[in-house]
Image: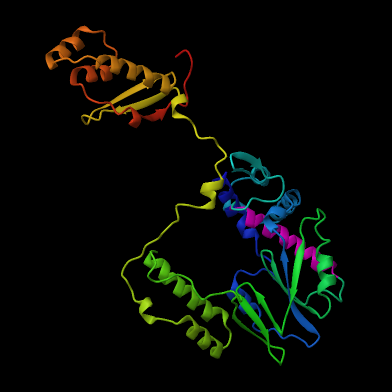
């Protein structure tokens, strides 16, 4: 289902961001605020949706997405699937979310799944619809002059004193009652949004700084820590890039660079490039709703049993349970190795005794130890036909 969600995200992704209110990142925000002037009777405020993903109405979102797909003239360039096919798969992906917790399997009954590639797309498209409805129906005295949104974070310029009535209006748009907004107004002519601090200047213009919470320690990644060098260098590059693209005034950029303690030695070329991927994620720990299969109860399989005394391995096949066949092999092998025989006696025994299997013969003739614990299934028959 994860790969299916990735493909749905690829198909639906281009539908997102086709409005003037969409914010791609902090750099995009800085460019959008470059020429803004704030009047004396106005103020900045921000809204945030409480737990957007898990509160996004799936049924309403599906209707919105179908309408967007109907209006999309480029859909056939991205997929050969029909709109009906896309919607059927999307509904299945959004309504069959399972996860395990403390040995119990749960199904998500509302909202979109955290961690699913298609969830941000669905939530974004629902928010685009919601903001459009909110702005069209807002009374003029509380209607924001500026509305910039990054997923569930919204920055607005509004008339002073309209924060509470505007929030009340926004909380009435979603008829399910699940989408709820909280708000924050500017303090001392400043307001944080994303990783920027927006500052109102006396003449009504604004400047942007890098925002750091009061609890921020300026500690990112110790250079002597056991992390890949590329990770350490990328921290520096990211911080410097943010300084150049977000901070609007040169003197503030100089102060930001000084606070970062820029070390030019870290930018030397190393002549190689490496990519690293974490092997332990929340998905690895939480999303495993299928029970692990016990190999002993597997039937219709090809298996391998190695010898610990030489490089040989026994390859066999069985239509019965793998565990049952293993017990038979072990019982036969134990019987063949119970009594002490000379090599010539073992050879005579093998030649005269009924042939059980090559594995039993190997134990009887060479008296080698078999790696029962290392036995494994090589392949499983998935298309077995009875009576053939």
Residue 131: quadrant of the picture: bottom right
Residue ID at (63%, 57%): 120
- Furthest-left residue in this view: 344
Residue 208: quadrant of the picture: bottom right
Residue 331 appears in the figure: yes
Residue ID at (42%, 66%): 231
Residue ID at (37%, 25%): 302
Is residue 300 shown in magenta? no
Residue 377: quadrant of the picture: top left
Residue 48 percent across, percent down from the top left: 71, 66
352 vs 181: above or below: above
Q: Is residue 347 left or right of residue 140?
A: left
Residue 338 percent across, percent down from the top left: 25, 15
Residue 213 percent across, percent down from the top left: 61, 75
- Furthest-bottom residue in this view: 203
Quadrant for the C terminus, please: top left
34 vs 387: above or below: below
151 vs 384: above or below: below
Residue segment shown in magenta: 117-138
């Amino acid at each position: 289902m994860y790969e299916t969600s990735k493909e749905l995200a690829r198909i639906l992704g281009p539908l997102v961001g086709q409005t003037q209110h969409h914010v791609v990142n902090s750099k995009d925000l800085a460019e959008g605020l470059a020429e803004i002037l704030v009047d004396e009777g106005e103020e900045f405020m921000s809204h945030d949706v409480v737990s957007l993903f898990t509160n996004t109405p799936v049924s309403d979102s599906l209707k919105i997405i179908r309408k967007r797909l109907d209006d999309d003239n480029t859909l056939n360039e991205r997929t050969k699937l029909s709109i009906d096919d896309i919607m059927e798969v999307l509904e299945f992906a959004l309504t069959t979310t399972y996860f395990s917790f403390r040995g119990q399997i749960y199904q998500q009954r509302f909202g979109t799944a955290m961690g699913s590639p298609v969830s941000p797309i669905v939530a974004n498209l629902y928010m685009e619809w919601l903001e459009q409805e909110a702005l069209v129906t807002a009374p003029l005295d509380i209607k924001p002059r500026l509305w910039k949104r990054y997923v569930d974070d919204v920055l607005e310029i509004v008339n002073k004193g309209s924060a509470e009535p505007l929030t009340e209006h926004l909380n009435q748009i979603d008829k399910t009652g699940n989408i709820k907004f909280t708000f924050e107004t500017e303090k001392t002519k400043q307001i944080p949004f994303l990783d920027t601090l927006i500052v109102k200047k006396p003449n009504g213009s604004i400047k942007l700084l890098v925002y750091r919470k009061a609890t921020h320690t300026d500690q990112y990644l110790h250079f002597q820590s056991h992390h890949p060098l590329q990770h350490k260098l990328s921290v520096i590059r990211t911080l410097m890039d943010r300084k150049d693209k977000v901070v609007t005034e040169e003197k503030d950029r100089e102060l930001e660079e000084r606070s970062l303690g820029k070390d030019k030695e870290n930018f030397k070329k190393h002549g190689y490039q490496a990519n690293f991927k974490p092997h332990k994620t929340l998905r690895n720990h939480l999303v495993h709703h299928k029970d692990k299969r016990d190999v002993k109860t597997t039937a219709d399989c090809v298996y391998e049993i190695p010898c610990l005394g030489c490089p040989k391995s026994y390859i066999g096949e069985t239509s019965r349970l793998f565990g049952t066949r293993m017990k038979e092999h072990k019982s036969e092998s134990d019987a063949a190795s119970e009594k002490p025989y000379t090599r010539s006696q073992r050879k005579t025994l093998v030649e005269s005794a009924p042939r059980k299997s090559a594995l039993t013969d190997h134990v009887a003739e060479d008296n080698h130890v078999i790696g029962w614990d290392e036995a494994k299934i090589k392949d499983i028959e998935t298309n077995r036909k009875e009576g053939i």
